[in-house]
Image: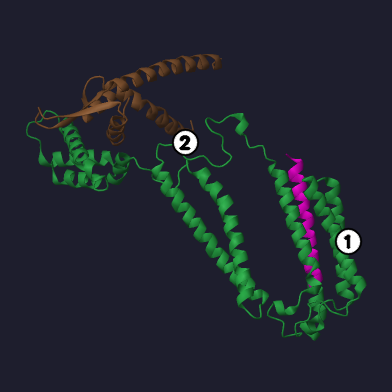
C-alpha cells in the first residue's frame, strides 16, 4: 500500500470508528461509568477512543437525554458517573439493530464482491 | 491537583459558559488524576519527577485546551454553515443586483440634478465608487444577519426560501429551469445594449468626457464624414442586432446563426478598416495632426483584435455547447 493509500485508510478508519463511539458508550454505560473507567472499558473492548473526544461526548449525550449523570463522593476522589437512561437504552437498541443489519449487508456484499 | 493541571483545566473552562465551568473543571480534574494514578500503578511512594512526567504526558494526550474547550462548547466554528449557505447564496443573488441597480440609478439622478455641467467621466467615477461601497455594505449586512441566524437556528430547521417546497425534497422540487437558455438570452440582451451604445457613438459630444475643450463640445466623429459611411456603419450594426434578436428569441446558439454573426463581424471590421485608412474618421481637432495616421492605424488594429477575439469566443461557446 503506497503512502497516499495509507493516509486515506487512516482517515476512513477514523471516520468508521468515530461513528461507533456513541453506540459503544451507550452500551458501556448500561452500568454506571466515570470518565476514565469508560475509556478503559472501551479500550479493553477493542474500541480505543481519545479522551478529548470521549469526555465532551458524554456531556452531549447527557444533554440529549440519553445519559444521566451523578457525582459520587463516597470515594477519596469525587467522580461523575454516567448511566444510560431509558431513552438512551432505546436508542442503543435501535443502533444495535442497525449495526446487525449493516453487518449482514456488508458481509453479503463482501462475499458477492470477492471472487 | 497540581498547579500544572490547575492551569490546564483553567485554560479549558475559561471560554465555556459560566454555569458549566465548575462541573466540567471538576470532571476533567478527576479524569486527569484517575489517568495519572492508573499510569503510576501500584507504586505507594512515586518519585515526584516521574509523577510530573506522567502528568505532562496525560495533559499532552488531552491536547490543546482550546480544542478541548471547543469540543465541550459544541458551538459552530464557522460563520455561515452548510445549513444557511444556500439561503446566503440565494439572498446575495437577489439582493446585490437590486442594491447595485438602485445605487447606480440614485447616483445618476443625484449627479445630474445637482451638477450644472455634467461630465461623463465624473458621472462614471462617482457612480462606480458609490455603487461598490453600497454593494460591499449590502454584502456585509447580509453575511452578518445570516451568520447570526445560523447560530440561532442551531439544530432547528431554517425558514424556507421562496420557491422551496414544504417537507422532504421530492423530484418535483428539481430545478428544471433552462439555465443555458437563460444565459444565452442574457448574453444576447447584453449584446443588444452594446450595439445600441455603438450606434450612438457618432452623436456623442466630447463634452461628456474631459476632452470637450479640444473641439468645443463637438462629436468624436469627423462631421465631414460622408453620410454613406455612417449609413453603412448603422447598417452593419442593424444586422448584428438582428443576429442577437434571433439568439434571444431562440435561446440557442445554432451554427447557422453563429456563422452569419461571424461573417457580419468580419465584414464590418473590413468596412471600418477601409473607412479608417482612407479618410479622417475621428474629429480632426481631437487628433494630433502629425500622428493622425498612426492613430487611425491603431484604431483599425484594435477593431481587428476585438473581431478576432469575438470569433474565437463564439467558436469556443459553440464547441462547449456541442460537447454537452
Residues under labels 1 and 2: Cα distance? 60 Å
Contact between marks 1 and 2 (CB within 8 A): the answer is no
- Residue B261 vertical position relative to residue B5 in the rendered view, above or below: below
Q: Looking at the image, which residue is at 52% across and 17% down? A: A109
Image quarter where the C terminus of chain B lies is: top right
Magenta residues (range): B299-324
Left or right for A111, reference A41: right
> In which quadrant of the rendered view does residue B124 lie?
bottom right
x, y percent for residue B73: 31, 41
Q: Name the element at disc 1.
A: helix
Q: In the depicted view, which residue is nearer to us: B320 or B55?
A: B320
Chain coloured green: which letter? B
- Residue B244 vertical position relative to residue B195 in the rendered view, above or below: above
- Residue B142 vertical position relative to residue A59 in the rendered view, above or below: below
Residue beneath disc 1? B267
Rendered shade, chain A: brown
Which chain's residue wears label 1? B
x, y percent for residue A99: 41, 18
In reply to whether residue B310 is colored magenta, the answer given is yes
Q: Looking at the image, which residue is at 40% across and 31% down? A: A14
Q: In this view of the protein, can residue B76 be seen by the observer? A: yes
x, y percent for residue B88: 51, 47
Q: Looking at the image, which residue is at 7% across and 31% down? A: B44
x, y percent for residue B305: 77, 64
Q: In the depicted view, which residue is nearer to us: B142 or A19?
A: B142
> In which quadrant of the rendered view does residue B215 lie?
bottom right
Residue beneath disc 2? A3
In reply to whether residue B243 is colored magenta, the answer given is no
> In which quadrant of the rendered view does residue B304 lie?
bottom right
Amino acid at each position: 500500500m503506497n503512502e497516499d493509500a495509507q493516509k486515506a485508510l487512516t482517515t476512513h478508519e477514523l471516520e468508521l470508528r468515530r461513528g461507533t463511539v456513541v453506540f459503544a458508550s451507550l452500551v458501556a454505560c448500561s452500568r454506571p461509568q466515570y470518565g476514565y473507567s469508560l475509556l478503559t472499558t472501551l479500550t479493553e473492548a477493542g474500541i480505543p477512543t481519545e479522551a478529548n473526544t470521549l469526555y465532551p461526548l458524554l456531556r452531549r449525550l447527557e444533554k440529549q437525554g440519553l445519559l444521566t449523570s451523578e457525582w459520587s463522593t463516597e470515594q477519596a476522589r469525587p467522580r461523575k458517573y454516567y448511566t444510560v437512561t431509558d431513552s438512551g437504552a432505546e436508542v442503543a437498541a435501535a443502533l444495535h439493530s442497525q449495526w446487525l443489519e449493516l453487518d449482514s449487508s456488508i458481509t453479503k456484499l463482501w462475499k458477492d464482491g470477492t471472487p | 491537583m497540581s498547579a500544572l493541571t490547575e492551569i490546564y483545566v483553567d485554560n479549558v473552562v475559561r471560554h465555556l459558559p459560566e454555569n458549566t465551568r465548575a462541573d466540567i473543571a471538576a470532571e476533567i480534574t478527576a479524569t486527569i488524576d484517575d489517568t495519572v494514578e492508573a499510569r503510576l500503578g501500584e507504586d505507594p511512594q512515586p518519585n515526584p519527577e516521574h509523577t510530573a512526567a506522567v502528568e505532562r504526558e496525560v495533559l499532552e494526550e488531552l491536547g490543546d485546551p482550546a480544542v478541548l474547550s471547543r469540543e465541550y462548547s459544541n458551538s459552530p466554528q464557522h460563520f455561515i454553515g452548510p445549513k444557511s449557505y444556500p439561503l446566503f447564496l440565494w439572498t446575495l443573488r437577489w439582493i446585490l443586483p437590486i442594491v447595485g441597480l438602485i445605487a447606480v440609478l440614485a447616483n445618476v439622478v443625484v449627479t445630474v440634478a445637482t451638477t450644472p455641467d455634467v461630465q461623463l467621466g465624473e458621472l462614471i467615477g462617482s457612480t462606480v465608487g458609490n455603487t461598490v461601497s453600497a454593494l460591499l455594505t449590502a454584502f456585509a449586512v447580509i453575511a452578518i444577519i445570516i451568520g447570526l441566524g445560523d447560530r440561532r437556528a442551531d439544530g432547528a430547521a431554517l425558514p424556507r426560501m421562496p420557491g422551496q417546497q414544504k417537507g422532504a425534497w421530492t423530484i418535483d422540487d428539481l430545478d428544471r429551469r433552462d439555465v443555458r437558455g437563460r444565459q444565452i438570452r442574457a448574453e444576447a440582451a447584453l449584446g443588444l445594449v452594446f450595439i445600441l451604445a455603438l450606434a450612438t457613438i457618432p452623436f456623442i459630444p466630447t463634452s461628456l468626457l474631459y476632452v470637450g475643450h479640444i473641439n468645443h463640445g463637438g462629436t468624436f466623429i469627423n462631421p465631414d464624414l460622408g453620410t454613406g459611411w455612417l449609413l453603412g456603419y448603422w447598417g452593419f450594426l442593424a444586422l448584428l442586432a438582428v443576429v442577437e434578436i434571433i439568439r434571444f428569441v431562440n435561446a440557442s446558439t445554432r451554427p447557422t446563426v453563429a456563422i452569419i454573426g461571424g461573417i457580419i463581424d468580419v465584414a464590418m471590421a473590413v468596412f471600418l478598416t477601409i473607412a479608417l485608412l482612407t479618410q479622417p474618421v475621428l474629429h480632426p481637432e481631437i487628433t494630433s495632426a502629425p500622428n493622425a495616421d498612426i492613430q487611425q492605424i491603431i484604431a483599425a488594429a484594435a477593431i481587428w483584435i476585438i473581431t478576432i477575439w469575438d470569433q474565437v469566443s463564439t467558436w469556443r461557446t459553440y464547441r462547449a455547447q456541442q460537447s454537452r
